[in-house]
């Protein structure tokens, strides 16, 4: 509902500013709606076609990388604030190869926490976060597997 009201206000603003005619706004809105429906349908059909086990494995991996990146970013903020001072030396410098201010660097920073000059503590936080997630995922997954098999074995 909020998104719809924002679109309506935006379209009204365009119409009131005189930059577009009502016909152009209606045609543009219908084309945008059709494009949105097409993208939604393709996304749905694509997700339905992917086996659930693979889909969840990929999303779990991506979320794990995102969480590790957030942990490393939190360490950076604490180091910049002077709260954490240990292991603050630069682990490596890949800014000549891929700067985190470039478009691709920003995308990687957002998705997986890429930094072209991370501190040693950031790298440690990243690796520890990933290790904890992997261990917990394997531990919880191994506990659920026997329970799932037991449920399938019982008639009912």
Image (cartoon, rainbow, N blue to C red):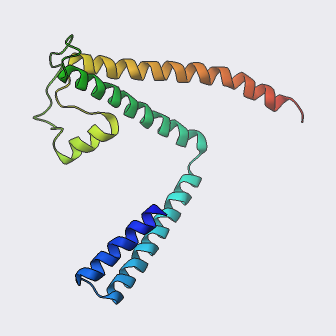
Numbered disc total: 0
Q: Nearer the viewer, residue 61 or 49?
A: 61
Q: Residue at x 21, y 10 (%)?
A: 86
Q: Residue at x 50, y 18 (%)?
A: 135
Does residue 74 lie above or below 1 as drawn?
A: above
Q: Is residue 87 left or right of residue 155?
A: left
Does residue 60 lie above or below 141 as drawn?
A: below
**In the picture, residue 76 is in which quadrant?**
top left
**In the picture, residue 10 is in which quadrant?**
bottom left
Q: Is residue 38 left or right of residue 27?
A: right
Q: Nearer the viewer, residue 1 or 110?
A: 1
Q: Nearer the viewer, residue 24 or 39?
A: 24
Does residue 23 lie above or below 140 as drawn?
A: below
Q: Position of residue 107 (x, y in %)?
A: 27, 44
Does residue 47 lie above or below 31 as drawn?
A: above
Q: Position of residue 41 (x, y in %)?
A: 53, 64
Q: Nearer the viewer, residue 121 or 130?
A: 121
Q: Position of residue 73 (x, y in %)?
A: 28, 28
Q: Is residue 96 left or right of residue 144?
A: left
Q: Quadrant of the C terminus?
A: top right
């Amino acid at each position: 509902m909020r998104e719809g009201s924002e679109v309506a206000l935006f379209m009204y603003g365009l119409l009131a500013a005189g930059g577009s005619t009502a016909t152009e706004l209606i045609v543009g809105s219908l084309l945008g709606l059709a494009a949105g429906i097409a993208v939604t349908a393709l996304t749905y059909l694509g997700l339905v076609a992917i086996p659930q086990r693979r889909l969840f494995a990929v999303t779990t991996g991506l979320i794990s990388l995102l969480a590790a990146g957030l942990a490393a970013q939190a360490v950076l903020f604490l180091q910049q604030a002077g709260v954490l001072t240990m292991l603050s030396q630069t682990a490596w410098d890949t800014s000549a190869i891929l700067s985190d201010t470039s478009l691709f660097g920003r995308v990687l920073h957002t998705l997986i926490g890429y930094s072209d000059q991370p501190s040693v503590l950031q790298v440690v936080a990243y690796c520890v976060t990933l290790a904890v997630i992997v261990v917990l995922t394997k531990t919880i997954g191994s506990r659920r597997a026997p329970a799932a098999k037991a449920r399938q074995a019982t008639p009912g």
